[in-house]
Amino acid sequence: MHKKLLIACGGILALLVVIVIVACSNISMKALDAKSVYTVRIYPNPQNGSLKLSEQYVISGDWITVYINPDPGYTLQANSLTSFNEDAPDLMGKTFYIKGTRYQTSIGSNTRITAAFVPVTEGQHSIHIDSGLENGVIFSNPLSAATGTSITLTLVPEPGFDLKAGTLFVNQTALSDTPPYTFTMPAENVEVKAEFVAKDFDELKTSGWNYLTAKQYDTASVFYEEAWKKNPQDPEAIFYSSLAKLANLLIDPDVRSLLGTFHIPTPGTLDDWICDGYTEGEKWWGTYSGTYTIGKTSYEGRDITVPKQSPASWGFVTPYSDFPISHEPAHIQTLKNHLFWGIIASNTVGFNPLVEKIQRDIFGKDYEAIVSRAASFPANAKVELHSGLKTRFELDDYYGPETTYVGKAELDYIFGTLEAIKAAVEYLSAYDLTIDLRNWLITQIVPEDGLDEVLQKMFDTAAKNGARENLWKDYPTVINMLPFRNNFLRVRNASALPRAKSDFTKAFGMINDSLSHWYGTGSNSSGSSSWSPAAASKNNWAKNGIVQVKAAVEGNGVFYFPNKIPDTFIDPDWVWPSPGWDWPVSTTLDTAEVKIYGLDLAQFFTPGVFSLQNLFATEMGGEAPQLWQIEWYENKAASYDPVYTGKKNLVTKAIDRRGRQDDVVGDNDAPYGKFSFMLNTGHLKEIFPRGFETYTSMADGSVASVGSQELLTDIFPHIAMWPWAPSYFGNTITATQLYYWYHLR
């Protein structure tokens, strides 16, 4: 239920959640702010047809729609609809696609658009929209067709207006008064006439419902917004306008820019996000940029299809190279690597600006207005859930096939989830995330690179004909990029932590109320249809978990959780635990399959608890991490698997560049040395009082058993940029350089 409801709001959790008001199918001008604003115009005006813009003045990054209307006997010439940068006329504007007779494009400059129309070919007839139509537009799909072809007309009224009953005509034939508007092409050219008139409150709600039925979500959202303006106490207007405004944040220019951090193109309309206008199986990302199908492995569950990254991501290892860091990801780990480097490339001076942008553009005043509107929904009211939405977002398994009524429980769950995400962002804002990452992008990085390889490329002064030979001699540059030498993860704004805690408490309370409503034994206060017994049994564990974590946050207690949860959405082949399973308590022991962890919430909300000085074993007054040498070898007899000897030595002086320990000899007589920083296990056990004390590798490579006294001292942090091998500063030059910069400088 939880994921499906979020998807139902238009992909609310699209990695970070989003929403605001801007229906690109709304042809009236919207209020402009102080952001960059560009002018869009039709020039030169085409002959034998006309173009109409949804917007003339456009905020940078926003979308416009161009409506195409051939004169009688004409149609659009293939590939003639073009956009030009006004400031650089020879440069084409970025064109995503033409959908039916709407042309949509993202605007980033003063733009002019033009087209050419040609006579229809033999056997074809034209479709022309009355040029005198006011208070809205109509466009057809296609623009011309042969006799007998099924034609669909799309109506886009201006806010507050809709079709006047009995006025939509194709030549002399009247069409239905409600969408979808279709007709069969006659053996002659067609002219479409209609009249749009202002609608009252009830008519606006009816039109909104009808456009939902027609799967025109942008237009439906405009109708429900206008209905709410006329009667902000009406439950149906509150419910659907709240969801519409929430979903519309996805297409806000600022939010789309934020999503672009992942180097994945995003559509500019709700219709495209929800995808109902496409052929079966095709999603918006297929139309915009193609897809990748990622194969599963033994631990990843099902195959997944994701949008391709934009070409911008292929070159983000610049400034000193144009090599791609990634191509098609054949593995989910590789995809994660792509996204990781995409975020790094978009935030080269640290993540404080990213956190601030999320707070401003996603959880700012527009979001708060939506939250306030949703909170006004009456506690005991109910509204019918549109059957098309229930089917589109696969909610039948939860609500059943009968007519479904929804209300405050659904809104509380959606906005409670968003409040939890907001609280997480507030928590991040308490820490200083400033760190200069530009030098991590100096050379070609590939998905197989571990931290060892990345660091080595940074230290390699011979690369690029010595272009970086002075990098490590520039002390200010180094201290900006090496943690411990800068302020990375030190306290930035301690006052954000109590706000985050308060918002977490609020969020868990809202979610708990919703889950209790759905899965509890009490009466159904909003009058929603009963949940199916299977759904309640399957998801009751979620309610219990929320109750437990809420109590832990409010009481500064410990929340216990397993490393696996009963989520068949993630892995349909994994069915543990059985229905009715409850969350673990402090006395729960680890099993062979599931490991139990505990999070001390009092520690979690203590300022600075996750600073590097606390997380790692340090020296020199906490300004430098301890550097340790790990003794191991590769076993030739077992596919060169690493074998750890169990020995480790604190490095107390400069390391020989060879870095080898001759007293460590493996089965293949090849000694190897590895280096790493050590976690501050005592501090981590205060934050995580259960779980970590038994998570360790023994000398023979096995995992320590329950009750073992081996503690975290054998665990060393690394970034697994490849999924199949350890990465512990294996290159000895890297270890030598790091010791030099942390200790000798």
Image (tube, rainbow, N blue to C red):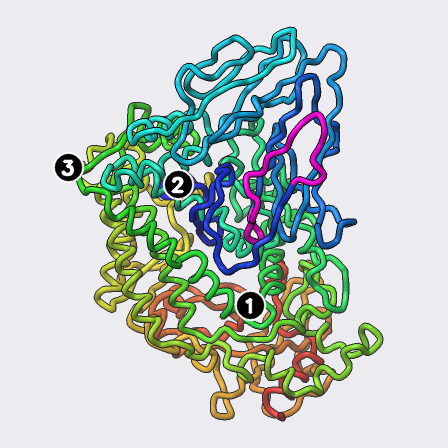
**Contact check, label 2 and label 3, Cβ < 8 Å:** no
Q: Quadrant of the N terminus?
A: top left
Q: Which residues are magenta?
A: 42-62
Quick one: 236 or 118, which is closer to the camera?
118
Spatial CA span between label 3 and label 1: 58 Å
Instruction: Residue at the far top: name it.
Output: 187
Crowd class of label 1 (few under 14; some 14 to 19; many from 20; radius 10 Å): few
Say what amino acid the circle numbered 2 marks: Ala
Residue 303: where, in percent of width, then height?
56, 40
Relative placement, left or right, of 213 versus 56 is left
- Mark drawn on residue 244: 2
Q: Which residue is mark 3?
A: 523
Q: Is 54 included in the stretch rendered in magenta?
A: yes
Spatial CA span between label 2 and label 1: 58 Å
Q: Say above or below: 465 vs 218.
A: below
Residue 592: where, in percent of width, then height?
41, 54
Element type where label 1 sits in the image:
loop
Crowd class of label 3 (few under 14; some 14 to 19; many from 20; radius 10 Å): few
Say what amino acid the circle numbered 1 marks: Asp
Q: Quadrant of the C terminus?
A: bottom right
Q: Is residue 47 visible?
A: yes
| Residue drawn 47% across the image and 17% down it | 168
Q: Which residue is mark 1?
A: 700
